[in-house]
Amino acid sequence: MASEFELIDLFQDIGSEFYSQNGIIIPPGDDCAVFQSKKPIITSVDSSVEGVHFPKSIKPSEIAFRSIAIALSDIAAMGCKPIGFSISISSHINNIEWYKDFSEGVKEISKMHQIPLIGGDFTKGQLNINIIVYGEPFEDKILKRSGANEGDIICISTPVGRAKKGLQDLQSGVKNSNYTKAYLRPESKINLGKKISEIATSCIDTSDGLLSDLKHILDSSSVGAEIYLDEIPITQNIDDINAGDDYDLCFTIPENQSNDSFYKIGKITKNKSIKFISEKGYDVEINGYKHF
Amino acid sequence: MASEFELIDLFQDIGSEFYSQNGIIIPPGDDCAVFQSKKPIITSVDSSVEGVHFPKSIKPSEIAFRSIAIALSDIAAMGCKPIGFSISISSHINNIEWYKDFSEGVKEISKMHQIPLIGGDFTKGQLNINIIVYGEPFEDKILKRSGANEGDIICISTPVGRAKKGLQDLQSGVKNSNYTKAYLRPESKINLGKKISEIATSCIDTSDGLLSDLKHILDSSSVGAEIYLDEIPITQNIDDINAGDDYDLCFTIPENQSNDSFYKIGKITKNKSIKFISEKGYDVEINGYKHF
């Protein structure tokens, strides 16, 4: 049976070597964490529930890594730099070994992004991980969903449906395919966000499905789009366009800034509808992940 | 059956009239919220789980108010000013009326403290409310748990055990006693924190029980205490000294700054033990709320 103090010990110092470079003034252990930045602070919270957002079979370190990576994806989507994160864990698990393994996943992603754990909460309940992330702009620019203009090119950076295939592989007993990693250990596209932060006019991360996430950009920007279905890199079939969990960035850039490092999958139109274009005869509907 | 969009509509604009005074640059509706402050940012997360932190019988608006008040209490404990909050709700409830009532509690406390809701997440799962609070110092000083010095006076501002009595009243069917309010609608002691922020040497909020919370101050400050049991204002009996959920502030002030607006319940000693002093013959043990 794990005591609260044993748990706090496991997590207390994760990423403490990154406190000073990230402006952390008062680290975990007080009523609040305190940090300082001359720039605007960006923040987001993401909840991952067992049986809903991840299967019961995956390892605690994978649950930790994945939950944090997903939350960091929101920082990437703003073209910003993460500076720290907090974890609120609800759990009925009493086995200290579970938390040790969980803390390994936390340590790994903390090191990967050089960000400290700055606070958190432990409570009893269904396994539910809430990650709060904090960040700031790399320079000045913060990417929003609004800002896409007529004529802008719509881009993504990786094939859609990789995480969906990874989850299918896991569920059929395949433990280490090229795709399971895409599901279990999504790469938070912080570097991609940095790279595009000065040229993109809008950005979102693809968590619910490319089409439904792109629709948020279109709605926020009061524009429409032509989508070149044949240009979208897919994993299994065209339905991957609605597959969730990819955590790529979908963004728009002015046509004259366009280059070949990204997949160009469409163009922003003044007309507020979405028009699908395919010579291969693809037919799709927007049908992203429903949270409720 | 509530759709995610109906839910977002209910919460989207809560406290939007307070965005500009609190430095909110990008409000909810993007991947992250963004705010700006020239001062250090303080932040904390608090999880409230149905059946663990609150009974199933209480109203959604009360769940909302209480969860947020408890989180704000951590801001008060740092002697700081709240500037905004986020809510992550996991729930299996589909009835839109439940969320409407919940949003009323959110609105009420948003207005009371003039702070906007700046972000959040909805997920399916056991009812679990995570509140993330953000704040900044009123002037410059941030109160910590460490900092108590030998000879400092230990103070609280209200009798202990009020919330415990309130929960007992609720459980025995009393709906509106003087105490049910203390449990259902705890007052976040932001003004008290402001008042003492320049004179206190340490501070904590009393969530787990006065004695066990005071012990955090003593441990963080590497000091001990004499506790004058007869001076502690109690609600039912001396065991209230270990009653949780009061969300008062417990703080230390130098003896020469001491005044009569607070209950003086003890004195900081160099010797790192806790010594109980009572002429009434009270005998107590430290026995606060165990989270696990």
Image: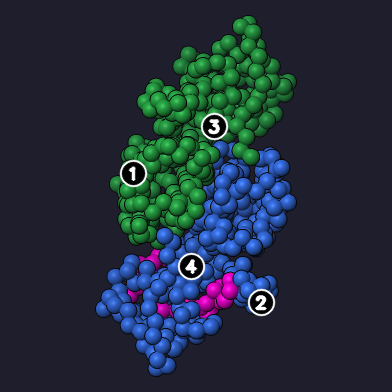
Chain colours: A blue, B green
Amino acid type at mark 2: Ser
Q: Position of residue B183 (x, y in %)?
A: 45, 30
Quick check: B95 above or below A146? above
Residue underneath mark 4 = A207
For the residues marked 3 and 1, what is the alpha-carbon distance in whole angstroms? 26 Å
Q: Nearer the viewer, mark 3 or mark 1?
A: 1
**Res. A127 mark:** none
Q: Which residue is mark 3?
A: B207
Give the magenta range: A142-168
Image quadrant occupied by the N terminus of chain B: bottom left
**Residue depicted at x 41% and y 88%:** A282
For the residue pair A161 and B55, the one nearer the viewer reads as B55
Q: Residue at x 41, y 27 (%)?
A: B173
Secondary structure under the numbered disc 4 in the rendered image: loop
Which residue is label 1 attached to? B101
Q: Where is mark 2, residue-wise?
A: A177
- The residue depicted at 65 percent of the width and 18 percent of the height is B284
